Each structure stands twice: as C-alpha cells, then as structure tokens.
Image (cartoon, grey):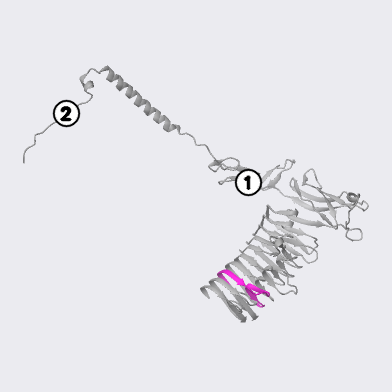
Amino acid sequence: MENFIGSELYTKKGIGAFALNQESKIKLKNIELNSIGGGNVGGVLFTSYEEEIGSYFKVTNGTFIEFNQENKNPSSTFIYVNKNINVTLNDCNIRNIRGITGYFIYNKGNTNIKLNNVSVEDYISQKETILFRSESTANMEKTIIKFDNGEIFIKDSMFLNIYYFTVTTDANYVNDYYYVDDSCIMDIGSGTNLYISNSNFNSIHGFIGFKSSKNTNINIVDSVIEETFFKNGLISIDSISRFGYYTIDNTEFNSNTADNGPIVNIIDINSKSKVIFNDSTFYDNSALYYGGVIFSLIKLYDDYGNDIKIYSLEGDSVLSRIIFFITETDDPNNAIISGQPISYCWEDICRFPVVKVIGNPGNYKLRMKLITYGTYAKFDNNSINIDMVIEECDTNNYINQDKDNIGFKSCYLPTCDPACNNGGECANINICNCTNTKYKGALCDEHYKLEKVTYFDNIMAVISLIIILISVFLIAGIMKFKKYQAVKSGFFINLWFYPCKNI
C-alpha cells in the first residue's frame, strides 16, 4: 500500500488497523494515520498471529499521530506480534501515543526488529512505560526495551518525553511520583546484541536506564543522551542481575541527573561486566547525592569473606566505631584530589566522596586508604587502587588553565551563568567575548554610546562662517554707498505698457 491517508478509526474489539497471519507480508509506503484507537488485546496499528517464517511487516515514510490503546490487559499501542516475523520501520514519525499498559512493540517470541530514522515523541502510559516488550522470560518486567537471544538495531532515531512513573491520587501527595522498583527503559536479556547509532534520547524519566543480563553486548555510537533522570543511573551494574558489556563511542551525555551516578551506577561488579567509553563527552551531569558521572559502592570484608557491617552507633563512642578512609593519588606532586577526600563506611557500604582529580598528564593510581578501623584491629593491607589516566588537553576545543588556583591546570569547556546575550561567546568561566557583536558589558547586553558625527558639524560651521562674512561685506557696502540713488531705491521694476487693439 502506498500514498495512503486515514484518520479517526476505532477498532473497538478488533485487532488493529492491519492484521496478518501465517506466511504473509505487509509493506506500507508513504502512509499517514491520525486518531487511531483500539480496545482489544493487540496492536493499534498492526497485529499478527500464527506467523510462519518469511513473514514481515515493513513501513517506509510513515506518520502516526494520536494512537490510543484502551485495553487494560497486556497489549500494544502500536505493534503486537508473536514470533517468526521481521518488523522494520524506516523514516517514521510517531507522536502522541497513549495507553493503559503502554507497550509500544509487543512480541511473544523470536522477532527481528529494526528501527531506522524513527522518532517517538510524547509517549504516556497510565501504568508502566514500555516501548519494546518480549515475553521470552516468565516475569513481567517493566521496561522500554526487553529482549532475549536476538539483535536490536536502532539507528537515526529519537526517543523524547517518555515518563516512567505513576502519580498518586492521594490528595495529600498529588505532586509525588513513584517509580516502579527495578524498572528500566532497556532490559536486554542473555545473548542479545543491542546496536544504537546516531540516535537521541531526551527527557526520559525512570528508575534505571539500561539493564542487561550475562553475555549481552550493548553498543552506542554517535548518539546523544540528555536531560534524563534515572533514579539509579543510566547504566546500572551489580553482580546479581545487572551485567553486560557496554561499548560507548563518540556519544554526548548532557544534563543528566540521578540520585547517585547519573551515567554509571555500580553496586557491585565482576568479570561478566565492563563499561568502555571512547571519545565521549560529559557536560553538566549531576547527582542528588553522590557521583556526578559515576557512582560506585565500596564494601568491606573481613579475613573470612564476611561483610563488615556497622550498626547501632549510639553513645559516646560513636566516632571511634566508624571506619573512615581517605582518597588520594599515588603521586601528589603531579596529581591531587580537589574536594573532600575523607569519607566513611556506614552499615555495609562505604560511599565514594565527591572529588575531582586534577594534575599533569600521565598514568596514576587513585588510592582509597583506611585511616581508622572502627572496632577492628589495624592491619597492613588497608587500601585499594584504581588505575587512572590524565590525558593531554585538546587545546583546540578546550581551555587549559589553573582555574581553581591549586597549581595544576584543568582541561575544561567554558561555562557562563547567566549566558552571554546577543551572540556573545563564552570565552571562559563567566567571561563573555562581545567582539563580534554590537554590544558590550559583562553579558554583551549593553549598548555602546552614540558618537557625535563631527564631519557634518565642521561643514555646517564653514558654510555658516562664509554666510556671515558675505553678510558683513554686504552690510559694510550698503553703509558706505547709502547715498547713491541705486542704494536708496533698493530695487526698481521696469514696467512696459502696451495699448490694446480692438479686434
């Protein structure tokens, strides 16, 4: 089907605008659908069942606006399939999607899904927000993307304004939001490969971002992740259920927020997990508590492998029972810690302090060393080291100055708050360059004083002087020759009269 426009379709107990079974194929091109609704288990756009190998559903250049799924059971606001089918969306614009159990693409078995240049905007679900859902596992996870044993390709796409929480109806807590525990936007099952390239994730809110199982590879290239809030971070890793190998290349992370570690939140880690960043940029990311970019918990164990826990700190001996540690570098002459280097251990967790490492380019070790031992005897093996590299500053794109006045240069992008106005360039920390503008001032918002144009004034002065001189000479001449008849008469009019002739 090509060049089709449709609107105001409600399937009620139907199974979607398009349906397929057995070995069938549907190919749509240049299609636009508006105000489409459904009330049965299935996809509002497309539903398939009893598929056979070779079936596919493909859309090229599609626009889909105001889709609404009213069924309360697990269903789909867009596509609902079972297995043995290929789903491809190319150059599609999808926005204003509404649902009760908000699955976007729902499948029960092995399905290949490809998204190329797809924009999903303003997606709202009354329960959990789930874009891709696979029922290859027994538990009903609350995710945006969940797959086992397959491949997912997301290319040239955008995910915008996705909110993953519910609002309480209690009158005392009208504005409170409750995140679903262990919910995430992407839950990648064992043996799955996820490839994301040249895509944008903007204004997404949820509990965590990525959650992956063993033997899972997630590759993100040339993408932007910005203005998101994940309570437990974009990438969450532990040694129980959150694993995976992440490779992130040339990706920007801007203005992301979390309780702890907005980009990477490590509860515990082992050899089954790894996160690698290459040529990526982190700008204005922050945490409500700890870790502006990465958060990692440190646990203490005794000689028998048991967790050291600190509870019930009461009485006069509280401080003597707390375990304190300091964060430092192995070469303080070339790299130092900026911030509060001392932190403590509480219960079974030691929180990494919010610090910056500033120094000369080179290889270093970041050391966390115990300085008190609480109720335990002092021992020698009292520190851990983390390898760290301070790279050369790219002065073509960054400023390399001692902005903190600590004796070491920092490599940073200039920031101005408030921002420079009228096209002014932020040249350094809160310093605006107004050279290429018509304004001046600290924020390039002040007009220059108008300068008087003296050229015209000089011309008018010369003309006035000439007129005055001429007037003086005329007056002097008149005074000298005032007795002459011509001067006395002032002027004379010679009139000639001609007689009229009768005709």
Of circles 2 and 1, which is in front?
A: 2
Q: Mark 2 to mark 1: distance in Å? A: 82 Å
Outermost residue toward the front?
171
The residue that label 2 is drawn on is 494
Judge left or right: residue 236 versus residue 4.
right
Please, which residue is most extreme toward the right here?
377
27 is higher (above) or lower (below) than 356: below
Q: Is residue 381 found left or right of 92 in the rendered image? A: right
Residue ID at (12%, 32%): 497
Q: Quadrant of the C terminus?
A: top left
Check disc 1 and report its element: helix, strand or loop. Answer: loop
Q: Quadrant of residue 137?
A: bottom right
Residue kind at label 2, given as amino acid type:
Asn
Q: Residue at x 47, y 34 (%)?
A: 452
Q: Amino acid at mark 1?
A: Pro
Q: Picture coordinates of residue 226 (x, y %)?
A: 65, 57
Question: Residue 37 has which mark?
Answer: none
The reply to whether callout 2 and callout 1 are in contact (CB within 8 Å) is no
**Residue 52 visible in image:** no
Residue 240 position (above or below residue 342): below
Start-end of magenta stretch:
59-84
Asked if the magenta segment contains residue 73, the reply would be: yes
Where residue 201 sits: x, y (%)?
A: 65, 61
Judge whether residue 306 is colored magenta: no
Residue 245 vertical placement versus 409 (above, below): below
Answer above or below: position of 430 versus 62: above
Label 2 neighbour load within 10 Å: few <14, some 14-19, many 20+:
few
Residue occupied by mark 1:
418
Alpha-carbon neighbours of circle 1 within 10 Å: few (<14), some, or many (≥20)? Answer: few
Image coordinates for residue 250, horizontal then vertical, percent: 66, 57
Residue 368 visible to an observer of this rendering:
yes
